[in-house]
Image (spheres, rainbow, N blue to C red):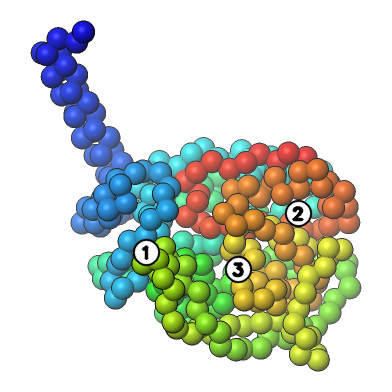
Amino acid sequence: MIHKKGFRFFLGICSVLSILSALFFFNRPGIPDNIQRLIRKDLQKCGGLLKEVRCAVTGEDNWIFLQESLVNLVVDWDDNQQAFIAFNDSLKKRGITLIVAPVPDKLQIASEHYSNELSDGIIAPEYENWIDALQEQGVIVIDAVDEFLERNEETPMFEAYESHYTSAGRYTLAQMIADTINQMNLDLPKKKWYLRDTIVPGSGNLYHLKYDTYPDYDVHLLKTVDAKGRNYRGSKDAPIVIIGDSNADYCWNFASNIGAFIAQATGFKTFTRSRIGGGNLGPTLFKNRSKFLKGKKVVVWVFDGRELYGKFKMPEF
């Protein structure tokens, strides 16, 4: 049986450790102190958890952000680069080039809608080190943050009620990926596709998460079509494969996902294989499917950048 004094001492130690833990997690270089206090307050609304939970918080002008975006800013990132390096090496042995394309997080790009004091954006303190570490090991990484910030001033890369990037955001990232692919001088047949602009209902996944109902609003959507106006559809024999989470295949139809935009920008066929919530599971999508990789030239791994703090799966083939 624990003595009362010993029990009080134990509680005191736990309290001190909790305070030190809070100070450690919320003393992040590069993030203003008042913003760290705001993040701490919002995390408390989501249970105060420094790990991912399904929870959304409201910023300025009723914009909504995922709790995970906050966690990505204030926790120490896992040392996950080895999974990317191993995946890159596994594909390289098969004559396939890996392109890693994290989607810039909504909170980093639309930060002024989280707090009006963040008009210049906010970057996770460990982001640049993560990019540098992979590039030093020969992994091709698309760093789209600056491009998103610049274009966001005229064309929104994100909208208020949705966690995924807009059609314009998908096309922006696709163009950067396509620029890298076009520099490879791939000896492959090309085809011409075109872009068509349309308007569709917005999905508002964050609005639904927070209010348990869907909003009624419209968004602009680009889609990829052929010369006869038929929607783009990927094919399994395509030399370029796009994998990842819902950001890889997020769209109203196949003609609007990032794979379709990459096809339009390169002239090469693409095929998209994705899993909702599976950005960090990218390499496992080829488990027991190594024959599928025969004849492939490029694998593009597209996933939510807000997941970069976590662990990533090693390749299983």
Give above or below for 214 relative to 55.
Answer: below
Looking at the rendered structure, the secondary structure element under dot 2 is strand
Disc sitting over residue 210 in the figure: 1
- Name of the residue lying farthest toward the front: 213
**Which residue is at the front of the view, 304 or 3?**
3
User: Which quadrant is home to the N terminus?
Assistant: top left
Whether residue 182 sits left or right of residue 313 in the image: it is right
Give above or below for 26 relative to 204.
Answer: above
Inspect the image, locate mark 3, and give the three-letter code of the amino acid beneath it.
Answer: Tyr
Label 3 belongs to which residue?
250
| Badge 3 density bin: few <14, some 14–19, many ≥20, Cα 10 Å | many
Disc sitting over residue 162 in the figure: none
**What residue is rendered at 31% in x and 41% in y?**
25
Label 2 belongs to which residue?
97
Inspect the image, locate mark 2, and give the three-letter code of the amino acid beneath it.
Answer: Thr
Q: How far apart are marks 2 and 1 (CA)?
A: 40 Å
Q: Residue 172: image x %, image y %?
A: 58, 74
Q: Residue 309: image x %, image y %?
A: 47, 46
Mark 2 and mark 3 in contact (Cβ < 8 Å)?
Answer: no
**What residue is rendered at 68% in x and 86% in y?**
195
- Which badge, 3 or 2, is on the more N-terminal residue? 2
Q: Residue 124: image x %, image y %?
A: 40, 53
User: Which quadrant is home to the C terminus?
Assistant: top right
